[in-house]
Amino acid sequence: MDIDPMDSVPDDEKRGASSPLSLTSRVAITVALVATFLGICKVKDDNIVQAMQQAQADRLDHWNFYQARNIREDVAAAEATQLRLSAAAAPPAVQDEYRRAIGAAESRATEERAKKEELRAQAEQDQQTYDALNYRDDQFDLCDALLALAISMMAVTALTRKEWLFLVALVPVAGGVVMGLAGLFEWHIHPDAIAHWLS
């Protein structure tokens, strides 16, 4: 007795087997497209995370150098003050030497102050860079979450063959794609409430 393999296939799949728009086909195509888009977003997100780490390291370095410049400024200012106090009791013959030493100490203090301010500005710029990158990282994180949810729903759809579940799964697909595109093209779409709740 010959057994037809199609006998074990449910009737709804038999009807859709020859149709390119069967539910199974739509699920498979959607999952493939979502996974491809998710992979592209993941590569970009990894690069952003690396840039965030670099910005954070730069910020810490600049603040450390700022503190070092601050200490040098304080030392030079204290030296200038000590020299002025010593000059008051020194004989007139060495006053010129004291004035030169005081001028050199004050010049060092001024130079260190200027360099310190440059480092402060760089550290603040590093923080702004980090914040901007973190904004985009949040977009990609939400994209990952929504698309992972969509793929899970597609898997259940493939098992249950429920058309309505496929349509529901398209909602997180749309949200994930929008958030992924926002991260890729630097759109200012950022659901702060969701990001704060998830963080």
Image: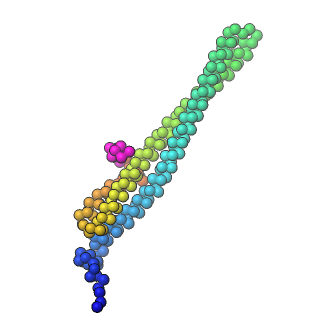
Q: Quadrant of residue 25?
A: bottom left
- In the displayed structure, does residue 86 sit left or right of residue 127? right
Q: Can residue 110 be seen from the camera position used here?
A: no
Tell me, yes or no, whether the highlighted magenta stretch contains residue 167. no
The answer to whether 190 appears left or right of 131 in the picture is: left
Query: As rendered, which of 4 and 21 lies closer to the eye?
Result: 4
Q: Residue placed farthest to the bottom in the image?
A: 1
Taken as a whole, is the magenta stretch helix, strand or loop?
helix
Q: Position of residue 93 (x, y in %)?
A: 76, 10
**In the figure, 78 relative to 178: above or below?**
above
Q: Nearer the viewer, residue 113 or 70?
A: 70
Q: Position of residue 182 (x, y in %)?
A: 38, 52
Q: Split into 4 quadrants, where in the image is the C terminus? A: top left
Taking the view exactly as shown, the residue that stands out farthest to the front is 1
Q: Which segment is the magenta one?
A: 189-199
In this rendered view, identify the residue nearer to me: 134 or 148: 148
Give the residue displayed 30% in from the left and 74% down from the top.
20
Residue 155: percent from left, percent from top: 32, 65
Furthest residue toward right: 93
